[in-house]
Amino acid sequence: MRLGMVLAWVIVLAAFVAGAMFWEQLPEEMASHWNIRGEVDGWMPKFWGVLLIPLVLVGLVLLFEAIPRIDPLKRNVKAFQRWYEVLLVIICLFMLLIHLQVLLWGAGLEVSFLFTIPIGIGILFFAVGMIFTKTKRNWFVGIRTPWTLSSDVVWEKTHKLGGRLFMACGLIALAGAVFQEHMLWLILIPIIASAVVLTVYSYFEYRKEKR
């Protein structure tokens, strides 16, 4: 097994272990959702509060293990396998961060999600932007429009621009930890705008290539 997959499974194990360690300190009903003001507005039984994210992590890692085998462009996935696994590890770390904060909140240490989530998402977006420039055309990971999937050249150009835009989105998202009243917009508006720009860009690059 490659190092990236080993690290991903270690993170999964850490999520289960953390849940076991906090179990006795947690209430029977745990906070599970917070609104835009950082107030709890959703609850779930302790069993699911402790196990939901670890189980999602198991499914995620299994999916990432399967993709290189089932993607019709599997040779392309293997060409950036190391970065593909780095992406998985980063996503797993982000989910572990959320899991730990839910557990800590349940145990009485109420650290505001309005502070930690923008930081986590900012780092995630920035890392995804760096990884985008390393990807090769495939059906599962990356900016998948009809035009990027139809051309290696369009894929590479779109992901070069996408890498820069996602890194910028990451930096803007970090500001949400400071300007918490605008946190949602600092995350959503840049990423939605980037998605629109990249979709249109890939279309025009494809048209340019076919002339």
Image: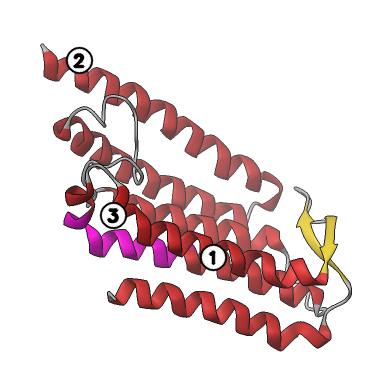
Q: Report whether 137 appears left or right of 144.
A: left
Q: Nearer the viewer, mark 2 or mark 1?
A: 1
Q: Nearer the viewer, mark 1 or mark 3?
A: 3
Number of marks in the rendered image: 3
Q: Looking at the picture, which amino acid does disc 3 mark?
A: Arg
- Name the residue beneath numbered marker 3: 69
- Please tell me whether residue 161 is drawn above or below residue 12 in the rendered image: above
Q: Residue at x 10, y 11 (%)?
A: 211
Q: CA distance from mark 1 to mark 3?
A: 19 Å
- Name the residue beneath numbered marker 2: 207
Quick check: is 82 in the magenta stretch? Answer: yes
Q: Nearer the viewer, residue 31 or 28?
A: 28
Q: Looking at the picture, which amino acid does disc 2 mark?
A: Arg
Residue 176, label in figure: none
Position of residue 80 measured from the top left corner of the image (x, y, whole percent): 21, 56
Q: Residue at x 69, y 85 (%)?
A: 20
Q: Which secondary structure, mark 1?
A: helix
Among numbered discs 1 and 3, the one appearing first in the sequence = 1
Position of residue 145 measured from the top left corner of the image (x, y, whole percent): 34, 29
- Please tell me whether residue 50 is drawn above or below residue 59 in the rendered image: below
Q: Which residues are magenta?
A: 78-91
Q: Looking at the picture, which amino acid does disc 1 mark?
A: Leu
Q: Which secondary structure, mark 3?
A: helix
Q: Which secondary structure, mark 2?
A: helix
Quick check: is 53 in the magenta stretch? Answer: no
**Circle 2/circle 3 CB separation < 8 Å:** no
